[in-house]
Image (cartoon, helix red, strand yellow):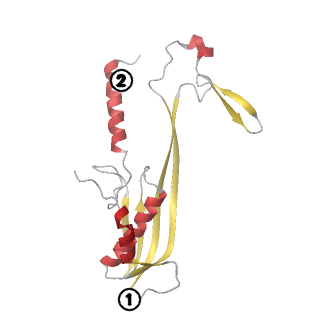
Amino acid sequence: MISRPLKSLALTLAIATATACTTATPYQPYRPEMAGGVHGGYSEQRLALDRYIVRFHGNELTSRDRVEGYLLYRAAEVTTQNGYDWFTVVDRRTEHDVRTYARPDPFYRPWYGPDYGYWLPSWRYYRPGFGWHDWYPGYGPFWADSMDVTTVESFEAQAEIALGRGAIPAGNTRVFDARKVMADLGPTIVLPKRP
């Protein structure tokens, strides 16, 4: 049996951890870990005077749309900061990372004990081609205790861009007016909260 003070401490730590992780990645320079802020952000690497690789890495709460939008915005910023007017997306990709964690619930212990296995909660589920089946969380090697199963997704987008000046080439869907991108996406950009 877990003591009341220990349960209270565990709950406080769980809430503190969850609170630190409940914010999608804002538009910020890349942070590899959550040291004093939210994980993720933008980075770029110069390949030539007019060529860059731009990246945006989102945390588990940042949608793919937001990651790709922030990448496009950063590409526009890099373009204007270097004195150019437009950029061409030479190559781009978005990586999707999915991880599933199964952890036993430390507080789940049936009060009625192991002699009442039949009385434990059970559910029915349907598998096409196999019919209805029963699931008992108290039986079997994997479901020996109640489990907390969590699936975590994160996205990282990357683009190689070539910068240009003057009139924007017509008819190329990979060419973007940097100032127009910044004007269009600017209202959707969420900056980090100041302490």
Any part of residue 65 in sight: yes
In the rendered image, residue 153, in percent from the top left (x then y), is placed at 49, 50
Q: Which residue of the protein is positioned furthest toward the left in this rendering?
A: 195
Label 1 to label 2: alpha-carbon separation: 65 Å
Question: Mark 1 — residue?
Answer: 166
Residue 83's place in the image compared with 13, above or below, is below
Residue 109's place in the image compared with 25, above or below, is above
The residue lying at 35 percent from left, 62 percent from top is 189
User: Mark 1: which secondary structure?
Assistant: loop
Any part of residue 46 in sight: no
Which is nearer the eye, 11 or 185?
185
User: Mark 2: which secondary structure?
Assistant: helix
Specify whether 11 is left or right of 146. left
Question: Mark 2 — residue?
Answer: 7
Q: Residues within 10 Å of mark 1 (few under 14, many from 20)?
A: few
Foreground disc of the pair 1, 2: 1
Q: What amino acid is labelled 1 in the image?
A: Gly
Specify whether 99 is left or right of 84. right
Quadrant including the N terminus: top left
In the rendered image, residue 53, in percent from the top left (x then y), is placed at 42, 72
The residue lying at 49 percent from left, 19 percent from top is 109
